[in-house]
Image (cartoon, rainbow, N blue to C red):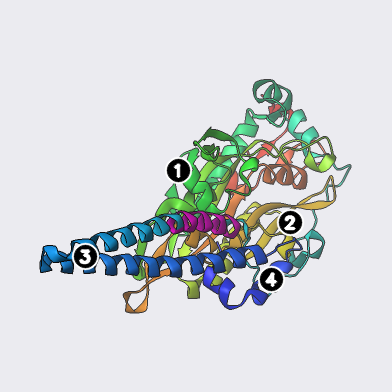
Amino acid sequence: MLDLNDLRRDPDRIRKALAKREIEIDLGELLSLDEEYRRNQQALEQARAERKGLSGRISQLRRAGDDAVEEIEQLRAGSQAVGERITVMEARAGQLSADRQSLLDALPNLPDDDVPAGGKEANRVLRVVGEKPAVGGPVLDHVHLAESLGLVDYKRGAKLGGNGSWIYIGAGAQLEWALLNYFVQTHLHDGYTFVLPPHLLTGDSGYAAGQFPKFAEDVYVVEEDERGEPSKFFVPTSETALVSLHRDEILRAEDLPRKYFAYSPCYRKEIGGYRTHERGTLRGHQFNKVEMFQFTRPEDSEAAHEEMLRKAEELMRGLGLHYRISLLAAGDTSASMAKTYDVEAWIPSIGQYLEVSSVSNSRDYQARRARIRYRGPGGKPALVHTLNASGLATSRLLPALLEQNQQVDGSVLVPQVLHPWAPARISPATRA
């Protein structure tokens, strides 16, 4: 959530920053509501002071004796009239506050100054790491490889879970779990605290992360409250859970940064189609992901962002995969984030790089929604910054791994870092 005081002080700066996202945003209604709310509050305080004065005068007259009965009755009538005005103004204040908050909640985060303006076409490739692998023969796509090697059962997955579902089986299940183990062990070594969050989250968690109210249609809602708002939903990413880990808390400055990582399946309504770059496990309703997360002081968040990008890249280099790093343009950056780097793995069969990790800095946007603060210099509470990074998502990583490591005989070499949990080579002969 944006700082309302910033909107009041410099609305033109806010407009210019949000214009980089290439979406229609009208601050006029919000600012008008805010002005009316403040006028109403001023009148409300004056009315309350007037009523208090009348009550005080009545008390004085009562102490003076019975001679003031008529004046007391007049004052009571005046106090009642003021009270009625106060009731109307309080109701108006509540409505104005709710309407203003609704508009404020819908505003996305301000992109950082160095984030390019525009949509996906304006994303900026920062670097390409490694060489595109030479297969030495026809490039087989990940769907063919996964089926021929008995790693993924798409048909039975659809039978069990419907379209957009799959089953990892045999060496495929081993490979999926090997990736998760590799991520977990690496993050533990790096000093991050392991978290296994609930798969069902409350509406407050969705609001804190910026998922609600605007993007509620993207998640699987299990329960709704009396207003029809989501009150329970399946976790779309562990980030949504980790944001709320310290919701409504004041942390100690000396305990920052707080570094966490979590594993969970991710449940989303998005689904792939029959186009090549959406087939197989590239996009579905459920996938596995390990997520890094940090709570930092504002002055440390830039360094934390770069650190988390390095951690995601270290995982990619450990797997020996060819990838690139892109800085997302404002219009392609999530609404809650100020700046995002994407780690994109090369998928040879489609000749494209696809995102396997988003490394994002929310600045104080999520912390303001979640009311997460720390005691800074002088002991005055200040908002923390929140950052997240996939470390990593497996549903696109597995296709990249299969395609980049395929051999001319149809087998796939498994990266050495996964050998403690998976076969060194998977071939048709080893199919379960």
- Of tags 2 and 3, the one toward the viewer is 3
The residue at which mark 4 appears reads as 15
Which comes before the other along the chain, label 2 or label 4?
A: 4
The residue at which mark 2 appears reads as 322
Which comes before the other along the chain, label 3 or label 1?
A: 3
Indicate the secondary structure of the residue bearing disc 1: loop
On residue 196, the disc is 1
Q: Residues within 10 Å of mark 4 (few under 14, many from 20)?
A: some
Amino acid marked by disc 1? Leu
Whole-angstrom CA distance, mark 2 to mark 4, is 39 Å
User: In the rendering, at what x and y percent does residue 100 appear?
Assistant: 56, 59
Q: Name the one closer to the observer, 212 or 185.
A: 212
- Of tags 2 and 1, the one toward the viewer is 1
User: In the rendering, at what x and y percent does residue 103 appear?
Assistant: 60, 58
Amino acid marked by disc 4? Arg
Which comes before the other along the chain, label 2 or label 3?
A: 3
Q: Does the image show residue 210?
A: yes
Q: Residues within 10 Å of mark 3 (few under 14, many from 20)?
A: many
- Is residue 96 highlighted in magenta? yes
Relative to 373, is 132 on the left or the right?
right
- Is residue 73 highlighted in magenta? no
Amino acid marked by disc 2? His
Predominant secondary structure, magenta span: helix
- Of tags 4 and 1, the one toward the viewer is 4
Indicate the secondary structure of the residue bearing disc 3: helix
